[in-house]
Image: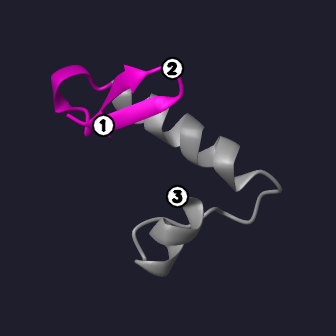
Amino acid sequence: MVEAMAKAKLWASPGGKTPDATLYAAILRDMRKGKDARFKKAAPGRFTNA
């Protein structure tokens, strides 16, 4: 997912050693927006568009 998003220029890791963890944390932060969130949890470790 990280590679696909970088290729599409939708998101890029800020150069960290764990871009997967960075993206996961960014999605979790977005979900805290409540009804304005762009993602919702579909299953453990899985997300869908809100």
Which quadrant holds the C terminus? top left
The type of residue carrying mark 2 is Pro
Q: Are marks 3 and 2 in contact (CB under 8 Å)?
A: no
Q: x, y percentage for residue 24?
A: 56, 39
Secondary structure state at the residue bearing disc 3: loop
Separation of disc 3 and disc 2 at Cα?
16 Å
Separation of disc 1 and disc 3 at Cα?
13 Å
Whichever of labels 3 and 2 marks the residue nearer the N terminus, that label is 3
Q: Residue 1 shows which numbered tag?
A: 3
Report whether 6 appears left or right of 16. left
Question: Vertical placement of 38 versus 17: above or below?
Answer: above
Q: Are marks 1 and 3 in contact (CB under 8 Å)?
A: no
Q: Residue 44 shows which numbered tag?
A: 2
Front one among 3 and 16: 3
* Location of residue 48 by image quarter: top left
* Residue density around tag 3, few if under 14, some if 14–19, many if 20 or more, within 10 Å: few
